[in-house]
Amino acid sequence: MRASQMKHSVLGLVMLTSSALFGCAEGVAPRVSTYRDTTGHEETIQRKTTDGNIARNNLSATIEGLEQRISRHPQNVDLRVMLLETLLSRTQFFGQYSDFEKALTLAEESREMFPNSKALIVAHAKVLGSVHQFQAAADLLEPFQDELEIHSLILGFKTSMGYAEIENREIKAEMARRNPNFRTMADWAHAESTIGEYEKADRLYQIALESYHDVSPFPVAWIAFQRGLMWAESANQPLRAVEHYREARRRLPGYIVATVHLAELEAEYDRHTDAIVMLKSVLGTTEDPEPAGLLGELIQDEIPEEAARLWENSQETYDRLLSQHQAAFADHASEFFAGPGNDTRRSLELALFNLNRRNTPRAYIVALEASLAAGDTAVTCSVLERASQIEGNPALSALVSEIESICR
């Protein structure tokens, strides 16, 4: 399974895509989703949300509009902050990773122009966090750590590195109790999920949804994806994740990571045709190499030449992304090179690089799988010893139990 590129909390970015930014009624229609998960709980989500394709077009139009306004009003800090965060939203949902370069360039340029702007410092930290430069992001915010909101952001970055999960949960809970709304409740839910409180996190995500009354599909899709990610990747209950991923795609058909995760599960449960159709639907719409890589795996027996072409394209894209932002793409690239990329030593190098930067269950899973693919028992046992000390993540615990006999 693959984890989200934006594992740390991104509610501040998601909320920028609300109707406050795109406020228009065009394409808005009631969308009712009713489904039953494996616990027997039936859930109905009824929201008037903008059609996902229209919302995507609106997002790109907003970025273009902000770029034009900044060219006319270069001294406007608010416009610069808004553009930075909106660019990150497009990378998050649609995998347009060239926006990382735009955002980094704009952030650095803006900081030079306005070195004392706290708003730009915070925005710059978010940009650094988006490319997994978590320590640099936290360091940038340190002068403002006495402020609760800033302290919360710092803890979010530390949690992404595998530290301060309990303190992060306490701060997020305090902020939600002080001011319960969509953002604070969703942040609290995410924090609970990082410490293994999955049922509680799921309830909090539902409460967050109940407090959302806007028309943008982005926050609704994001919550659905996070719930799916939690159940499949951490709680090790993939069946419970399927309908959440489907809901994310109903709201936002072009949501790349939701598409990849759902396609993996559909294929795992013998719905290969559905998986292939949804992966083909996003090819050519994204700079993310994962859809092509996974599609190649699914068609390799029937159309080996096409699979080989897809894998070649994926490798070229990973090579480029790794040369620009290795920290952000090391784990996903490791998975690719352990499989269709057919370079297990490179896979292991990337996995260990990632593990050295992120002491998280996800990083241990990637490192263990890479070492197994490379046949490096010494590394497997070294990583396994550390991984066995981590509690509260059934997915990691299951893998540890499965392979621990190797090291006896």
Image: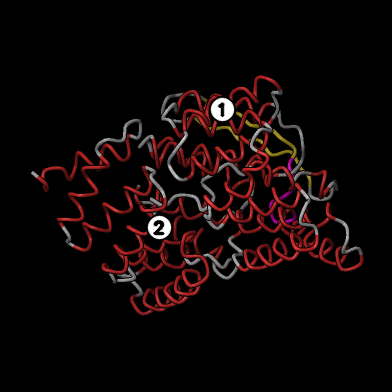
Is residue 93 shown above or below 167?
A: below
Q: Residue at x 39, y 43 (%)?
A: 360
Identified at 43% across, 30% down, the residue is 195
Q: Amino acid at mark 2?
A: Asp
* Picture coordinates of residue 246, whole percent (x, y): 53, 44
In the image, residue 191 lies in the stretch drawn in magenta = no
Q: Residue 43, which numbered label?
A: 1
Amino acid type, residue under disc 1 in the picture: Glu
- Tell me how far mark 1 sits from mark 2, CA to CA: 33 Å
Residue 405 appears left or right of 348: left
In the figure, 55 relative to 343: above or below? above
Q: Dot 1: what SS?
A: strand
Colour option used: secondary structure
The secondary structure type at the circle numbered 2 is helix
- Quick one: label 2, few (<14), some, or many (20+) residues within 10 Å? many
Please rate how many residues cluster around mark 1, counting C-alpha atoms within 10 Å: few if below 14, some from 14 to 19, many from 20: few
Asked if the residue at tag 2 contacts the one at tag 1, i.e. Cβ–Cβ closer than 8 Å, the answer is no
Label 1 or label 2, whichever comes before in sequence order: 1
Q: Is residue 299 above or below residue 54?
A: below
Residue 255 percent location from the top left of the image: 59, 54
The picture quadrant where one finds residue 69 is bottom right
Q: Which image quadrant is residue 301 in?
A: bottom left
Report the residue at 66% width, 33% height from top: 146
Q: Give the label on residue 331, or none.
A: 2
Where is 149 relative to 287, above or below? above
Q: Quadrant of residue 107?
A: bottom right
Q: Is residue 351 left or right of residue 5?
A: left
The stretch in magenta equals: 49-54
Q: Nearer the viewer, residue 145 or 194?
A: 145
